[in-house]
Image (spheres, rainbow, N blue to C red):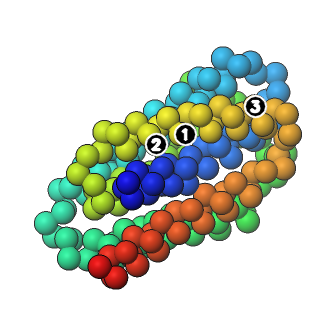
């Protein structure tokens, strides 16, 4: 049960980058249609699933070397990713600088990679926590898809108001999970 709660929290934290970009795209590109929002959510969800898979494979190849301090590594990686998200929340540029138009394939690829880079490090962390990655990446991808689609609709309706607050929440979730992993290991 702890594993699923952790993975759901990680998935929610990771999805916040894609959610924030979706909110901005919805606010800036109001002329786009629901199919654009679905395509954007599909790209974000797919990349958010792919990157942890790559990180997981890399982490499993180092498992024998880091087994005795894996909890510290998980904590540091999650705290670093969460801290980066919080930092970026305070450095977000105004909506006057438009993101790439998400209706183009190239822009979708760039935005998908940019919002899922953190998931690579988290995938490495997941390799320390679980032996089964399939359900984890499916859950992370599904959460990202749902939140990205919802973010686009929210952005179209409410604009740029929520963006940096969402990044802060995502960062705090990841840091909290890192602390929980570290404390749980140290107390056992």
Residue designated by label 3: 153
Residue found at the very far bottom of the displayed protein: 187
Q: Secondary structure at mark 1?
A: helix
Residue designated by label 1: 144
Expressed as whole percent of the image width and height from the top left, the position of residue 154 reads: 78, 37
Expressed as whole percent of the image width and height from the top left, the position of residue 40 reads: 60, 29
Expressed as whole percent of the image width and height from the top left, the position of residue 188 reads: 29, 79
Quick one: 133 or 121, which is closer to the camera? 133
The residues bearing labels 2 and 3 have C-alpha atoms spaced at a distance of: 20 Å
User: Please, is residue 171 above or below residue 141 in the view?
Assistant: below
Instruction: Give residue 140's mark.
Output: 2
Residue at 65% in and 31% down: 149
The residues bearing labels 3 and 1 have C-alpha atoms spaced at a distance of: 14 Å
Instruction: Give whichever of discs 2 and 3 has the lower sequence position.
Output: 2
Which quadrant holds residue 101?
A: top right
Residue at 86% in and 40% down: 158
Quick one: 47 or 175, which is closer to the camera? 175
Q: Secondary structure at mark 3?
A: helix
Q: Are the residues tagged 1 and 2 within 8 Å (C-beta)?
A: yes
Residue found at the very far front of the displayed protein: 1
Q: Are the residues tagged 2 and 3 within 8 Å (C-beta)?
A: no
152 on left or right of 73: right
Label tally = 3
């Amino acid at each position: 049960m702890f594993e699923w709660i952790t993975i759901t929290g990680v998935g929610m934290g990771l999805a916040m980058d894609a959610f924030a970009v979706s909110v901005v795209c919805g606010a800036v590109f109001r002329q786009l249609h629901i199919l654009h929002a679905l395509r954007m959510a599909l790209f974000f969800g797919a990349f958010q699933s792919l990157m942890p898979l790559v990180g997981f494979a890399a982490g499993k190849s180092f498992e024998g070397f880091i087994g005795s301090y894996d909890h510290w590594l998980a904590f540091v990686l999650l705290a670093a990713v969460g801290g980066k998200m919080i930092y970026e929340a305070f450095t977000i540029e105004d909506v006057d600088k438009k993101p790439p138009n998400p209706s183009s394939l190239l822009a979708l690829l760039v935005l998908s990679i940019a919002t899922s880079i953190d998931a690579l490090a988290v995938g490495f962390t997941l390799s320390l926590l679980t032996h089964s990655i399939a359900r984890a990446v499916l859950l992370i991808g599904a959460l990202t898809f749902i939140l990205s689609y919802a973010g686009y609709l929210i952005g179209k309706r409410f604009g740029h108001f929520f963006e940096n607050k969402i990044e802060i929440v995502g960062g705090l979730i990841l840091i909290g999970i890192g602390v929980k992993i570290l404390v749980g290991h140290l107390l056992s």
